[in-house]
Image: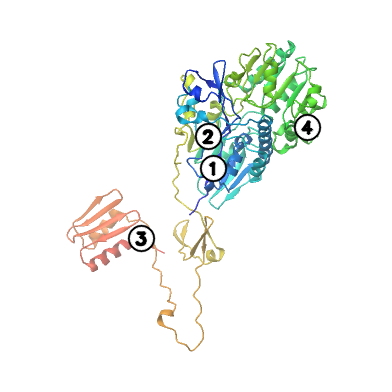
Amino acid sequence: MQCAQIQINHHYVGLWTGHDFHPQFPSFATCSKELKECSGHVFVDSVPEFCLPETELIDLSTVDVILISNYHCMMALPYITEHTGFTGTVYATEPTVQIGRLLMEELVNFIERVPKAQSASLWKNKDIQRLLPSPLKDAVEVSTWRRCYTMQEVNSALSKIQLVGYSQKIELFGAVQVTPLSSGYALGSSNWIIQSHYEKVSYVSGSSLLTTHPQPMDQASLKNSDVLVLTGLTQIPTANPDGMVGEFCSNLALTVRNGGNVLVPCYPSGVIYDLLECLYQYIDSAGLSNIPFYFISPVANSSLEFSQIFAEWLCHNKQTKVYLPEPPFPHAELIQTNKLRHYPSIHGDFSNDFRQPCVVFTGHPSLRFGDVVHFMELWGKSSLNTVIFTEPDFSYLEALAPYQPLAMKCIYCPIDTRLNFIQVSKLLKEVQPLHVVCPEQYTQPPPAQSHRMDLMIDCQPPAMSYRRAEVLALPFKRLFEKIEIMPELADSLVPMEIKPGISLATVSAVLHTKDNKHVLQPPPRPAPPTSGKKRKRASEDIPDCKVLKPLLSGSIPVEQFVQTLEKHGFSDVKVEDTAKGHIVLLQEAETLIQIEEDSTHIICDNDEMLRVRLRDLVLKFLQKF
């Protein structure tokens, strides 16, 4: 029986950032053209490269299905669909696909704006890399890092995605059924149920219980899971998202009142919608009505429009506004009143409209490419200006390293709405899975806060943990398989009651299996004899069906059986208990009767009459049908 292989793709394309380095290493001379030092840090002077998903453990050409949880989890998709021989199907919701397209389009646009003639490759040599300081020397699989894909590859990858809706059941080869559920984290973000007839696996990734703009998390459908695979928890468990939003607004207002500019490195979708909504409510009370807000991205216009048209994927309050009709997000009003302006780049119209002090939202959050680089260089030398980091994906200290020395203020307000450990504990108590599987990091406190026992998963039974590149066997023990029976075969069955409320019937049928579905069909009827004078050979005659022996059911009560033996003249009967049942010894007759749960054996020495006699005594305790 062939089962579908399911690879759940949850790897985000990784960006390399700066690390400490000391020039006295001999590798510095070898790689002097590739490595540039800045304020005690060294950086690879190359076009940005990206870390691909794990390919060593599995041949991606053998993968049948990829399930995408949210648009942050699909950034590596073109590498898989276009370069690994993958020919399967990808499933995702419509907002995930459309916003994922925007993120990839922005990424490609940023990279292509500033092309470099050469890529740095000498530092990747293992003999050189091991001499570099940590964490450069600890970078994983640097030889597999690749340049960014093209828009042609993006479009080709997205064409292979099949759109699905929440709670839609998708049959995979008859083996399992997968269902996306709202995870509450982003527009269209999904958790997945992978279910057979008798087993249920829940995959929970990037989920949120907070009240933000997406549909709330569907918790009820996760109940009765045999295994719950848990990943994608918050990267900053000690930071409260509401508190971070408050700090963001207050620091932004303080900078602008003092005549400074605010730079917010961000993605073109996601948290920016919530930030703009909070600022909409905060602007007038903070006296910021005359301060311009600029959103600069190649996909800024598309992102703002998409957020308004995916009404069915929004929370209830925002859905209600659509039917009034009102725009679900207040940034529509900010655009109408000219308080929020969006531009594809810093060139063209933006150059003419630009005035200070102002607030700029732009990417990329890594500060390695995109329009954010221009503003870091433009505003970095003034202490009046502030850069506020809200995305948790990158270390803000490493992001700022190439720009040192830096005069502008740096505020770290990471906003990560994904589940924290308190919320996870509450969730697991609600859905009560039999087993929890999670990364090893979730089962122990963070290394920097080893005393914080609350920053780890605590569940019963203890969670099964895994490390990178580790193969884990899930605790499944399949006992049953579902088999359908054809109606005409069912009509021919004559059940016989063996116990009150329990009836059985024998069946002779042909088992037909296709696409992991099993069907009992009536056996083929023998062909009618052909008329003619030619005599058939004996071997060509269709044999008559043998009369089926009756089936036996029931159990043998040992004490009553011994009494029956004694009544029929068997003396010196001895009973021994075994791990599987009992052994009845007839010492005079040198005979052994082995009674187990599902079988009975009579062992005697060449005395067929005795064996038949004992058999008949055994059959008196069993029911025939």
Amino acid of disc 4: Pro
- What secondary structure is marked by label 2? strand
Q: How is the image coloured?
A: rainbow
Tag 2 near tag 3, CB within 8 Å: no
Q: CA distance from mark 3 to mark 4?
A: 75 Å
Q: Earlier in the sequence, mark 1 or mark 4?
A: 1
Q: CA distance from mark 1 to mark 2?
A: 15 Å
Q: CA distance from mark 1 to mark 4?
A: 38 Å
Tag 3 near tag 4, CB within 8 Å: no
Q: Which residue is mark 2?
A: 230
Q: Earlier in the sequence, mark 4 or mark 2?
A: 2
Q: Is residue 135 in sight in this rendering?
A: no
- Tag 3: Cα neighbours inside 10 Å, few (<14), some, or many (≥20)? some
Mark number displayed over residue 622: 3
Above or below — where is 542 with respect to 399? Answer: below
- Rendering quarter of residue 179: top right
Q: Earlier in the sequence, mark 3 or mark 4?
A: 4
**Is 428 on the left or on the right of 286, as rendered?**
left
Tag 1 near tag 2, CB within 8 Å: no
Mark number displayed over residue 253: none
Q: CA distance from mark 1 to mark 3?
A: 51 Å
Query: Residue furthest toward the bottom?
Result: 533
Q: Which residue is mark 4?
A: 327
Q: Which residue is mark 1?
A: 7
